[in-house]
Structure formats: C-alpha cells, structure tokens
Amino acid sequence: MDHKIKNIISIHDFSTKEINYILSVSQEVYKNPDKYTDLLKGKIIATLFFEPSTRTKMSFETATKKLGGNTIGFEDIQTTAIKKGETFSDTIKIVSGYSDLIIMRTKIEGAARFASEITDKPIINAGDGTNQHPTQTMLDLFTIKQKIGKLDDISIGFFGDLKYGRTVHSLVEAISLYNPKIIKFISSPEFTIGKEYLKILDSKKIKYEILDTPIGNLKDLDILYVTRTQLERIAEPIDIEKLKKKYTITKELLDNENNPNLFVMHPLPRVYEIDKNVDDSKYNLYFKQAENGVYVREAILLILLGLI
Amino acid sequence: MDHKIKNIISIHDFSTKEINYILSVSQEVYKNPDKYTDLLKGKIIATLFFEPSTRTKMSFETATKKLGGNTIGFEDIQTTAIKKGETFSDTIKIVSGYSDLIIMRTKIEGAARFASEITDKPIINAGDGTNQHPTQTMLDLFTIKQKIGKLDDISIGFFGDLKYGRTVHSLVEAISLYNPKIIKFISSPEFTIGKEYLKILDSKKIKYEILDTPIGNLKDLDILYVTRTQLERIAEPIDIEKLKKKYTITKELLDNENNPNLFVMHPLPRVYEIDKNVDDSKYNLYFKQAENGVYVREAILLILLGLI
Amino acid sequence: MDHKIKNIISIHDFSTKEINYILSVSQEVYKNPDKYTDLLKGKIIATLFFEPSTRTKMSFETATKKLGGNTIGFEDIQTTAIKKGETFSDTIKIVSGYSDLIIMRTKIEGAARFASEITDKPIINAGDGTNQHPTQTMLDLFTIKQKIGKLDDISIGFFGDLKYGRTVHSLVEAISLYNPKIIKFISSPEFTIGKEYLKILDSKKIKYEILDTPIGNLKDLDILYVTRTQLERIAEPIDIEKLKKKYTITKELLDNENNPNLFVMHPLPRVYEIDKNVDDSKYNLYFKQAENGVYVREAILLILLGLI
C-alpha cells in the first residue's frame, strides 16, 4: 500500500483501508517482534504528557524502546517552561527541533490537531480531553480482529458508561465502518449512549438495541466491551450500592449466559465494573488488550516514520 | 550451577549456595563490565516506585542500561492510574504485558511477594516498607567479600539505629549464614538490636556483644556497618546534641582505635553519624559500597532473565 | 588540538581557542550527525536537575541519546534522598559511582564548581542560579557563527532584560573575545545593562551604544538577541501595557528597519517580547538556535568523555 499517513490525530481521519493497513502492520509486528528491534535506532520520540497518564505513556515508551528508539519528554506540566509563560505552540516548535516524532496528551480538545499544523514532525494524539484517543481505538480493533478473526459482521455489546466514555464513542464509530451484525448498548438509564451515535448507526442501517441489564443479553455476543461507570456524574440521589451490584460483570453472570465464545474487553483502568473473579476465566481479554497496545503503537511509529 | 532463581523478594528465600552464586556472578560482572553490554538489548525493565527512592531507582536503571536494556516506570504514585481507582494487582498485570521484569518499591510489607504471585514475570523487591530490601543486603555482602576476601569468620560491628534499621536486620541474618567470628551491636540503649535477632545468633552459637560506645570496641573489627540513628523516634526528652556527639564516627575516633584494617560501611543516605572527615580516609568503604550496587543489580537482572 | 577540557562550569574558564575548538566539533556533529550515533554506547550520563528545567533537560537527553548513550537522573529535588537529609556532596559522590558524566542544574551559585572539586567525573553546569549556563552561551555563539559565517567583527544588539538576564551577560562577555564591530544595548531604562559589562567593553575598546528603543537602531545589525523582560521586577507603578507595546519586536517593526540581513535570536522561553508574526518571517533564528543546542551539547559530551 502506498501509505501517506502523516499523523494520528482522530479516528475520523482514516479510511477503512487505512485502518486495515495499520492493523495489518500491527499483526506483522505482533508475529515477528524481533524483526524490528533496530529500526528506530538513533531516533528520538518525544512524549509530551501535559496531562498525566502513566499507563499510556509507558505503553508508548515500551513501543519506542522495543524498536530501538529513545524517548524524551515530561508527564507533568508543572515542571515545564509553560510555567514561565511559554506558549503551547513554542513548546511544540522547540521539541520539534529535538525529536523525530511527538506523542502528546492534553486536556484540551483539538490541541493535537493544532500541533500538527505548526510542525512538520509527525504527531500522535494520545488523548485530548474527552475528544479522541485514536491509538486506543486501533488497539481495540486489533484485539477484536485477533480474537474473533474478523471485524465485519460481529456482535458486540457496550456496557457501563456509554454517555461520557470516549473509548466507547470512538469504537462505536470505528466498528460501524465494518458493518456489525448487531450492537447492544447496555447501561443504567443515566449512562445511555448519545442519540448522535444512534443516528450514525441508523444512517448505515446497522442494527442496535438499547438495554438496561446484561442479564440474558450476552448470549449471542462475540465481545462485551466494558467501561467505568462514573457514578459521581449522577445528579439525583440514588442507591449507589444497588447500582453497582446491577452493573458489575461477574463470572457467575457470564457463566449463566451460557456463551463460551464471549470475550470481555475493557480499556482499563477498571474500578468495580468487572469483578476480579473474571480475571482467571476464559472470558478475560482485557489484559491481552492492554498488551496489544504495544504492538499497535510500534506499528504506528514505524508507519509514521516511513520505516515500513 | 543449575539456578532456578525466579524472583528477589526476601533475603530469607535464598540458601547460602544461592547467595554465593549471585555474588559470584556479581564478581564476574564487576571484573568484565564490557562483556555484558548487549545482553539486555530489546528488553524492557519496569521500575515501579510506588514510594519514591531516587537513588535506588538510579542504581537499578544504571544496571539495566549498562546491560543494554531499557526502562519504563514511574516514581510517584500521584501520577498513576491508581489515582483513578485502579488496583495494585491490575497495575502489575498490565505492566507485565509491557515488560520483561518488574522492579518495585512500596510502603506496604508483602506487596512484592503478592506481585510475584499474580505475574509470571520476575519481580525484584526494591524495598517494601520496613520489611525487606534484599538487593541492598546482597550488595553489602558483595562489598564485604570484595574487601575482606571472605564472608566466613569475619568480625563485624553494627552501629547506629539497630532497632528500626531494615538493612541492619537483613544483614545480621545474612551474615549469620556465614558463621562470623563475632558481631558487635553498638548503639545508644534506645536503639539496641531486637531480641529476635539475638535468638537467631544464639541458635547458631554465634558470638555477639551488646555495647553502648564505639570507643575501644573497634580494635578487632573487619567491618563497622553504620546506619542513620533516627533521633525523632526517641520518646523521652534527651540531650540530642550530646547523643549526636557520642554516636558520630569521626576519623579521630577511628585513628584512636589503632585498627588500620577496619572499613566503614553505610547503606546511605547518611545524616550526621559518619563525620565528613572519614570520607578521605582509608576507612571509607561506603561510596564504593554504593557503586557496587550497580554490579550486583546487573548480576541479578542477568540471572532472573536467564541470560547467564 | 590537544584538548584538556575537563568540565564545563563557566564560560570564563575557556580561552578563545578552546571555545573555537568546541564550536568546530559542534559543526562537525552538525554536518555528520549519523557518524556519532554509537560513540556513547554503554555510557551513563546523569542529569541531576535540583531545579526543574524541562527544556534544558530534554536538550541534554536528546544529545546523549543521539550519541547512543543513556541517562539517569531526576528533575525534582522533592523525590531525592536530600529530603532524608543527605548532603549535596554525598549525592554527587554516589552518582559519580553510577555514571560517566554529570550534568547538573541548581539554584545555588557555585554548586557546579563545588561538585567538580569532589568528583573525578566530568561536570556540566546546566545553570546555577543567576550565575552561569555556559552551554547556552556556546550554542548562541555556534548559531551566530553558523548564520553570519564569523564571530569577529559582527554587529549585535541585545534587547529586553539586560539587567537580570544571565544569558545576555554571558554572551556579552563571550562575544567580546571576538572583537565585535558594535554592540547595542536596547532596553527600557529599568532594565539597562550593568556598568561592570561596559567596563569590560571599554577595557577592550569595543564600541557600544545604550539605547531605549529598537526603532531605527536595527538597520546595521547582524543579530538582535532578545530576552524576556521581567516586568515583575519593576518597583514603581508604571503603565505595563505601554511598556509591553514599546518593547515587543514585531514583523512590522523589523520590516521598517529595512535590514534583510538581520536575524533575531532568543534563548527561550519567550513571553511577549517577540510577536508571533515574526515566527514565519526570514528574521526568525530562535527555533533554529534551540535546535542547535542539541549539536553543541553532543560535541561537549564527546569532548569531555575524550571520545573525539
């Protein structure tokens, strides 16, 4: 493929063909990790975490270092020159002079896009507020494809905070490119999926269901994608413990669904919404999912730097 | 030797034979540092410092990088996902997916042991509260052997905080495996060694003395092992300055003992208990001891990863 | 050249010949960056930032890693053993046991000099309070020479905070070694250059002018070196906005000077004193200047470690 991928800012920027290309390179790296250990030799990758996210930073740093590259950066805005009044754009321009590629995370929607417009170095958006975290979506897709064998025609449930969860929104949009068999949105009414996403599905004639309990609704699913329910967002007084109990996935609940081919994913960190007793079960795909992030990010680094 | 050392959690886990093996590999690395510079190429070592300890972290990172490996990690729990409610065990499982070996330091006794039970990756305990810091004990043993030529049959004094000092406790137990000639415990009465350690020595018929002054008691020692006296632990009002004066090792004090073969060790950081004028004397072994930590940790990394 | 450069503590320590040597090695690294990618293999460079300075730290880390070396260190004194009462000199001695070279930044004037006296490892001063930051001066000289083609006989203006700015003071002294055609000091009266620097110029018979506006005074300059005006230092109540307006370099102001050969430098971070509209103009040399810091620091590492 004649790839022209310059930055990774938003999942919206990519055609299905481009996503498939990224996933196929990821699979290549996954299968032959030792083949790529020197490709980033001498390269400097900047990890600018204006907002802390240790796990995401470690995943990108692991990817860089497995490819033989080096990182510079920060993970706390407190110690940067921005305290002395330096603007965001000056920081990007200066770091562009030091590095071959910039990975950045901010609280500000659109910051990564803006950065990509003022530097010639490739930019990877590692999360800009509640907006986009595209490499998370790509590793989600990679994990589904790796486990289920395909992205088309799958049955997927989303569970937890479907209203505020960035990863859910991005994955719904991405999976809708692959014509899923059915999407089930399972949440308490306070956390139901936004109408704008249903409109997208309607426009593509993708079948979906809005449900308020997992019980009895997981029998025909390939994937159950769980996210944190942000209980603190609920305005009215409710019985939190009751809600927790109803919206926690346990091994017993999964066993009762009698679906041995179901896999549970989660972008992590988890709080309570998947019980620990799922960890040692056959359903658990979430730790593998986190691990896959390294391979997908390796692939992305190789593609953006034109090394593959 | 057919070594099966999987983790470094507690000095108690090791037989004399295993400790000797670790020390002999350390000596090997010490003698031929350039022989091992590529063995960790492509390996990712996680340094999870839930409690800050910059010097220990730097020592492990130096060891890793001298072997050609790379590190990821954090040294401040504030910036980790644990703030978002992620459990310790999830952190360990996720980082296991990123890395080949995990070095961890926590305030919680037993945390490293627990970690070793939930991951297949090797774990090195870099300190769990007041409990264990086994690589410190190993570098202490290595330094004694390097300088004195043997671990058996030595005369060693412990000085300073013998009541609370973790390093003293571990080294007393470890050296007791080697049948010392005599152990002298020298401290103010408030900081005397715990009875449980004396019982161990009694059971092994190892000779010891409880003393309250270094003066006149260092003449026949090979090693004087000094630790910080934690004055803030003393409940009753006392004359601190008088105590400081009595329990500070100076060059004059050492010269007066007329023991040119005495070496002073200290796990560092030091506060006041060794006077600066000892630094440039022949007695000073403590900076060399700190440096030795790198070689011992290199050896441990090679052993745990099965690379030697 | 038979170079004997052991440390980089103060720009005052260097002869013109030595500075020229450092600049020529920098030029060598600049021209052939790929030639030096393995020279620091296996070397450990300590970056001890007792005072945070993310950008300077990133520049040194980039230099180290481009040469194939590794870094250890910290950028926040809060997490170091100094909190436990360890002295600065113990920290230096311990880190000397881990590393091949120490780069340090502190708030304390003279700290780097002191460090160089207690360790055999090379020391680079990355800023000691308001005193010295010699690698900044060297990259400034390198940038001027690269752009103008020479250091002798140039016309240079300094603009902004000439009273408190460390970089201005060091560069004035350094450039005075090269017999400049003229130096113009342009600032509001509150921020005028100190008399001690004028005395140096007088003693060398170097022509200078004290001016309070850039307007009309940039026509014959090769370089305009701008620094932050630290408005908060002004004691008396003044019209800040009026001052800002008068002491901001804009593209219009530069165009009106009708000097197409003028280049604007700035040690960065910038606050308001160079308008954004200069960024995309031909006058902008400040981002290139920041980038040059990496090459100059690579050269310095190679020289101090005796690798070139």
Image (cartoon, coloured by chain):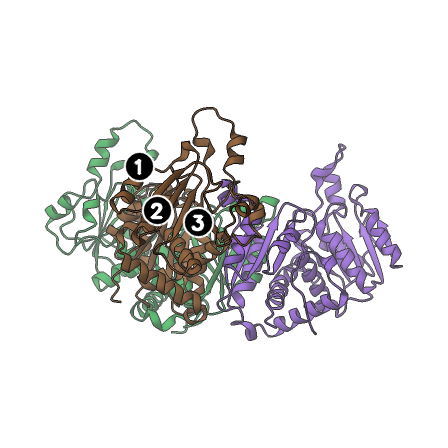
Chain colours: A green, B brown, C purple
Dot 2 or dot 3, earlier in sequence:
2
The type of residue carrying mark 3 is Asp
Q: Chain of mark 2?
A: B
The x, y position of residue C116, in whole percent, is 63, 56
Q: Which residue is mark 3?
A: B220
Task: Tell me whether marks 2 and 1 sit on the same chain.
Answer: yes
Spatial CA span between label 1 and label 3? 24 Å
Q: Which residue is mark 2?
A: B172
Mark 2 vs mark 3, foreground winner is: 3
Q: How many labels sit on residues?
A: 3
Mark 1 vs mark 3, foreground winner is: 3
Q: Which residue is mark 1?
A: B195
The x, y position of residue C15, in whole percent, is 76, 64
Spatial CA span between label 2 and label 1? 12 Å
Spatial CA span between label 2 and label 3? 18 Å
| Vertical placement of residue C205 versus B256, above or below | below
Question: Mark 3 packing: few (<14 Cα in 10 Å), some, or many (20+)?
Answer: some
Dot 1 or dot 3, earlier in sequence:
1
Q: Is residue A149 left or right of residue C68?
A: left
Question: Mark 2 packing: few (<14 Cα in 10 Å), some, or many (20+)?
Answer: many
